[in-house]
Image (cartoon, rainbow, N blue to C red):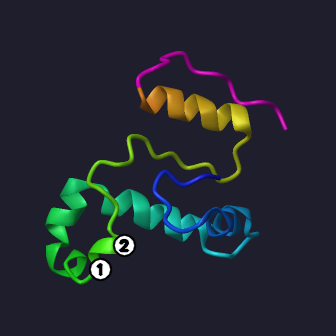
Amino acid sequence: MKAAHCRGDRATRRRARDRGRGSGKSAALARLVTLTDPEFRSHYAEQVALIPAELMPPEEAVDVAVLATGKNATQIMTQICQAAGAWTRRIPRPHR
């Protein structure tokens, strides 16, 4: 997992990326995605205004967000390509 917007030195960014289950990686990415959405910012303007400027990601900094839970790399990449409009063909799910 790599975040599109991550502040701090290289070691700090690596620690954020390499944490195990339950360490808050998904919550951090969800916050990043929602805070870059202009509609979310507008709807929750009062709450967003309480966030320090140095912690605010730029608007529209995230182009694509997908749910990766329980999916393999091929399925995730397919979702990303489809969401970005780069691929319209669906790949069948692998049999378990």
The percent position of residue 69, horizontal first and vertical second, equals 65, 53
The percent position of residue 11, horizontal first and vertical second, equals 68, 67
Q: Amino acid at mark 1?
A: Pro
User: What is the secondary structure assignment of the residue under circle 1?
Assistant: loop
At x 48%, y 27%, the residue is: 82
In the image shown, does 46 or 53 lie closer to the viewer? 53
Q: Amino acid at mark 2?
A: Leu
At x 70%, y 69%, the residue is: 15
Q: Report, in whole angstroms, how far the alpha carbon at label 2 lies from the one at label 1.
A: 5 Å
Question: Is residue 88 magenta-colored?
Answer: yes
Looking at the image, residue 25 sits to the left or right of residue 34; the answer is right
Looking at the image, residue 37 sits to the left or right of residue 10; the answer is left
- Which residue bears the numbered disc 2? 55
Question: Is residue 63 magenta-colored?
Answer: no
The percent position of residue 1, horizontal first and vertical second, equals 65, 53
| Magenta region, residue range | 85-96
At x 64%, y 62%, the residue is: 10
Quadrant in which residue 51 is drawn: bottom left
Marks 2 and 1 in Cβ contact (< 8 Å): yes
The percent position of residue 38, horizontal first and vertical second, equals 21, 55
Tell me the number on the disc at residue 52: 1
Q: Residues within 10 Å of mark 1 (few under 14, many from 20)?
A: few
Please say if 57 is above or below 90.
below
Tell me the number on the disc at residue 28: none
